[in-house]
Amino acid sequence: MGEPWPVELMNTVWADRDGQYDALDDDGEARVWLAVARSAPVLTVAGTSDDDRAALPRLRELRDALRRLAADVTGDPRTSWRSPVGSNEAVDTIDAIAATAPSWAALERAGDGALVRVTRSAASSADAVVSLIAQQGVELFADGGPPLRACLAPGCVLYFVAHHPRREWCSAGCGNRARVARHYRRHRGSPAAT
């Protein structure tokens, strides 16, 4: 997990040579993803309960809205996986989900007596985590946010934050595939199989 949480959520849709996959398609897998997110220090929330049943549909809805907005913001030409919502609907969805579980910073004493910052919410911890990811999505897409890019390597459907202005791909593997495809096109005159 090296990307901001909204990007990690967008990248629960991924592809390989055999096809495209949705890591949140299965409720069990979605619960695992949510549990991992809930255990991240930046997303740790003290909520009213740990019931995640109601949060799973919102998690998927948020992912779809984030991907749709990312496609628009990055000028992503890929059409292999598109969210059914429009760009304005995506903004409305992200805003609404961010508001579903308002949270606030609070102080708590750690075991050694030190004061630590915790995030509290009146909602369930699962709803609060989904809401916090939506809030981070607002920051990601707002003016001055980090530069989000679509990985345009053959067969890739992922997004990434370009911490370096020359970064073109989400991973070294995608960079290698893109270079091989480019080399093949130059020397063979037709695109390489992906």
Image (cartoon, grey):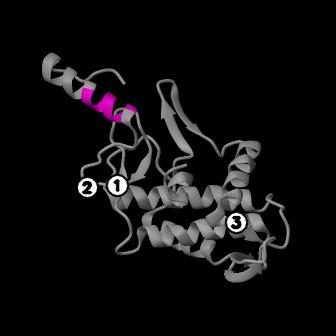
Residue at disc 3, secondary structure: loop
**Residue 7: percent from the left, percent from the top?**
50, 55
State the image quarter where residue 176 is shown.
top left
State the image quarter where residue 177 is shown.
top left
Residue at disc 1, secondary structure: loop
Nearer-N-terminus badge (2/3): 3
Q: Residues within 10 Å of mark 3 (few under 14, many from 20)?
A: some
Left or right of 108 on screen, residue 41: left
**Residue 38: percent from the left, percent from the top?**
71, 59
Asked whether 176 falls inside the magenta stretch, the response is yes
Asked whether 39 falls inside the magenta stretch, the response is no
Pointer 2 residue: 165
Residue at disc 2, secondary structure: loop
In the picture shown, does residue 112 fall above or below 126? below
Q: Residues within 10 Å of mark 1 (few under 14, many from 20)?
A: some
- Viewer-side residue, 77 vs 152: 152
Q: Marks 1 and 2, Cα distance to the nearest angstrom?
A: 6 Å
Residue 79 badge: none
Q: Are marks 1 and 2 in contact (CB under 8 Å)?
A: yes
**Residue 188: percent from the left, percent from the top?**
16, 16
Q: Residue at the far top: name it.
A: 188
- Please state the extent of the stretch shown in magenta in the rendering: 173-179
Can the viewer see residue 44? Answer: yes
Q: Which amino acid does label 2 sit on?
A: Pro
Residue 44 badge: 3
Pointer 1 residue: 162
Q: Which amino acid does label 1 sit on?
A: Ala
Location of the C terminus (image quadrant): top left
Task: Name the residue: 51% across, 67% down.
Answer: 137
Task: Name the residue: 73% across, 53% down.
Answer: 35
Q: Which amino acid does label 3 sit on?
A: Thr
Q: Marks 1 and 3, Cα distance to the nearest angstrom?
A: 26 Å
